[in-house]
Image (tube, rainbow, N blue to C red):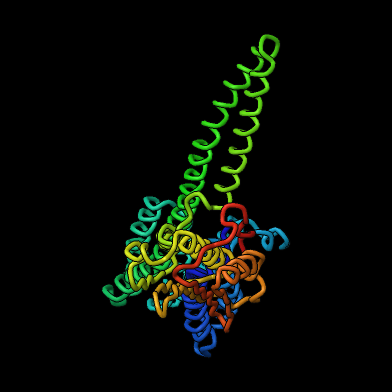
Amino acid sequence: MRDRATERGTGLGGFRRFLWWSLAGTTAFFLVYLVGGWILDPDVPVWARASSAAALPVTVVASVVLISRRLPRTPTGADDRARPARLPLLAWLIAGSAGAAVLGVVPLTLRNYGLWSLAPATMVSVAAMFLPRRQRRVLIVTAVPAAAALGGTVALVSGDGLLYAAGFPAGMVAFIAWMMLGMLWAWDVAERLNAARRLAAELAVADERLRFAADLHDIQGHHLQVIALKGELAARLAEADPARAAAEMKDVQRLATDALNDTRALVQGYRRTTLDDEIANATRVMAAADIDARMNLEPAVAADSDRLSPSGRHLLGLVMREATTNVLRHSRARHAEVDYRINGGRAHLRVRNDGAAGSAGSATGSGLRTLAERLEAAGGELTWTHDGDRFVIAASLPLGAGVKGAGTQGAGAAG
């Protein structure tokens, strides 16, 4: 099942629609325009016009339906399950092939060498779209000389020009196959690139989860090991030396409290969250999500560490993390910009992104409001604006500002 929001962000949905309309529209147009014009010609016998008029809509509809099966215009999902049952693929192939056969035999019987191969060549190419690559080549390589042989045979029997009668149908089959299968190739390449892009994003998330799991293991492993040893010692001393056993149990309680505090700090991001780390993480994650992210850092974040206090860098790091979460979760962004600079004794951080055409309220959850309160308590400011498809988060903080309660307060839920 494809992610519609993600596809809108990458333009893949529009590319699908373009290919579908180009292929299905071109196929239907030339069949209706060329064959229909021939059917309306009063010089064509009535029996030929009647039989071709019956076969033309069958061929056109079958071709469009088969193209839609191979190149669906919209992602598959619940909408498809809600639709009524459709004819099986083989039935459409048989119906389209029968109609194309009529539209080929009738003009060929009347020695119209420029028209008879159009519908059969179209159905051969449509059928080839459902075959593996090797079998697809065999079908086209077989169809080209077969078309030349049919046209040439009729020309020989009728005494018409052999070169045109044999060469034009063969060229028609080759050209239509080249056009239709070339669009199919572009479609398949886009699908593979989209799958690779989504896999890269999933790997970035998995890497972050592994990092968190490793940090959690480091914290909990040490504390639990010491707790287990002291608990075992206290159990052995419970009868022989109750006072020492009580002291050991107090140590166990202290260690358990330390483990709980360290775990909370890890979950809230205080253990490793800094502005430079979060900017580097945002660059990597946005690139994995196929977002063009520009970083304007004046001066460089790492080089400016001596001017901004550690608690201030930590708080701006939380703002950067929240902004990155909003870009990924609440927008269909294709472009983002991170701007960090020192001006007038204050550090300024601004994150802008496009693709925020939805409601601004979806991106202003408790995380931003909580961070705004914390920056205000530290003498700073956090604002966010939503204008059209643009969403901007701007934070400023005095260089010497400290963060009250940095070790105990949470950053709030993300977005």
Looking at the image, residue 201 lies above or below residue 7? above
- What x and y, as percent, mark residue 303? 32, 64
Q: Percent from the top left, x then y, of residue 409? A: 62, 56
How many numbered marks have been drawn onto this rendered protein structure?
Answer: 0
321 left or right, relative to 297: right
Q: On the rendered structure, is 277 left or right of 333?
A: left
Quadrant in which the N terminus is drawn: bottom right
Q: Is residue 171 left or right of residue 110?
A: left
Res. 157 visible in picture: no
Specify the quadrant of the image occupied by residue 372.
Answer: bottom right
80 or 87: nearer the eye? 80
Quarter containing the C terminus: bottom right
At which x and y percent is residue 78? 68, 59
Between 149 and 20, the one nearer to me in the picture: 20
Nearer to the camera, 58 or 101: 58
Q: Residue furthest front?
A: 243
Name the foreground residue: 374 vs 345: 345
Percent from the top left, x then y, of residue 397?
Answer: 49, 72
User: Is residue 309 at least partly visible in the picture?
Assistant: yes
Above or below — where is 181 with respect to 345? above
Find residue 412 and report its image quarter.
bottom right
Instruction: Please identify the residue farthest to the left as the structure is shown.
Output: 163
Q: Which residue is outermost to the bottom?
A: 42
Residue ID at (61%, 68%): 368
Q: Residue at x 33, y 58 (%)?
A: 141
